[in-house]
Image: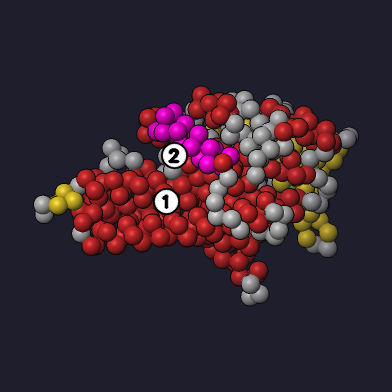
Amino acid sequence: MDFHLTEEQESIRKAVRDFAEREIKPIARELDDEGRFSPEITLSMGRLGLFGLSTPVEYGGHGMDTLSYIIAVEELARVDGSQAATIAAHNSLGIGPLFYYGTEKQKQKYLPPLCTGEAMWAFGLTEPDAGSDSRGTRTRAYVENGEWVITGSKIFITNGASDISAGVTVQAVTGETNGKKEFTTIIVEKDTPGFTRRAMHGKMMWRASDTAELFFDECRVPYENILGNVGDGSKIMLSTLDNGRLSIAAMGLGCAQGAFEMALSYAQERKQFGQAIARFQAIGFKLADMATKIELARTLLYKACWLKDNHLPFAKEAAMSKLYCSEIAKEVTDEAVQIHGGYGLMKDYPIERFYRDQRLLQIGEGTSEIQRMVISRYIGC
C-alpha cells in the first residue's frame, strides 16, 4: 500500500478544504443556530463536483476512487458536520444502492440528476422500532394490480424532507419464509400519492442537515420500482452500510482533525501563568495524544478505502474504521473542549458545535456496540 496520495487526491483535498473554509465556515454557526438546511450550499457542493464523486462518468458522475470521495467528506467534516452529512448520506446511502443494484433503466433515469446537486436521494431503513435490529422493520409492501402498495413509516432519514430531495429507497417487509421476514427495497419518488415527509427539528447535532420522518399510507408505485430482486432487501441494506461506514468514519476523522486544530491554535494563543498553555506539559501531552490518535485513525480508514478500490474484502476494516474514527472524534473533541476551558462551552467558539456534532457518529449507521459485534464475528468470536 502506497501511503502517498496521488496528485488528483491532493487536488481534491485542497479544493474541498478551500471551499469549506470560504463558503461553509462563515455561516456554519448561523445555520446551526437556526437549525436550517441550506439548499444554496448544497447546490454549491454539487457544482464543486461532490455529488456522484465516485459514480461512473456514464451516469453523470466523476468516476473517482473511494479514497478521493472519503477525503472530500473528511475535509467537509473538518469544518462542519452538517454539510459533510449531506454529502456522505447522499453518495453512500442515496446513490450507492441505485448504482450497485439498479437496472440500467433505473440508473439512466435517477443517477444523472443526483450527480449534479440539483436533487438528493435518501435511504429509508430506520423505523421507530427498528434501529440496530433492522429485522424489526414494520413497513410492509404487497403487490396489487401491478403496483407495490406500501404502508408504514421511517425515522431519522438524512436528506429525506427538503425540496431538493427527489425520493427514497425504502426497505419493506414483502413476505415471510419459514417464519422469517422477507425484505425488499423499493424506489419511491417524492410526489407519489400517499407518501408524506416531515422535517425533524430540535436536534442536538447536525442541525443544518436535512433529517426527516417519512410516512407511507397505501403508497402505490409501479412494480418496476423494485431495486434488485424480491427478498434482496437485507443484502442491499448490509452492503450499503458497509460503504456508508467508510463515510461516517471520514466524518469522525474530519471532526477530530478540526477539533485538534482548534485546540492547538487556542493553546498556542491562550496565556496563563505568564506563558502559552501549550508550553505546559499537561496540555502538550494532550495535544500529542490527539495528534497520534488522528494519525492512526487516518491510516486505518485509508487502508479500508485501498482495499475497496482494489476490489478486496473490506467489510471488517470498514467496521473497524467506523468504530475507531467515531470513538476518536469523541475523545479528541472532549479534550479540545477541556483545553478551551470555559470558552469551549460557549457558542462563540466552534468547538462547542463540534462537541455536539460528534455524538451521532457513535450511533448512526450502526452503533459502536454493533460495530464491535460485526468485528467480533469477522475475527471468529
The amino acid on which the numbered mark 2 sits, given as a three-letter code, is: Asp
For the point 25% across and 50% down, which residue is it? 267
Of callouts 1 and 2, the N-terminal one: 2
**Residue 4 screen position, x and y as percent:** 54, 51
What's the CA distance linking mark 1 and mark 2? 11 Å
Dividing the picture into quadrants, the one containing residue 177 is bottom right
**Residue 378 screen position, x and y as percent:** 65, 69
Q: Which mark is residue 256?
A: 1
Mark 1 falls on what kind of element? Answer: helix
Q: Identify the residue position indicated by label 2 in the image.
A: 80
Query: What range is drawn magenta here?
Result: 8-25
Front residue of 53/255: it is 53
Q: Residue at the far left: name it.
A: 274
Q: Which quadrant of the rendered structure holds the N terminus?
A: bottom right
**Residue 371 screen position, x and y as percent:** 57, 62
Q: Is residue 15 magenta?
A: yes
Above or below, 125 relative to 166: below
For the point 37% across and 43% down, which residue is it? 353
> Is the magenta region chiefly helix, strand or loop?
helix
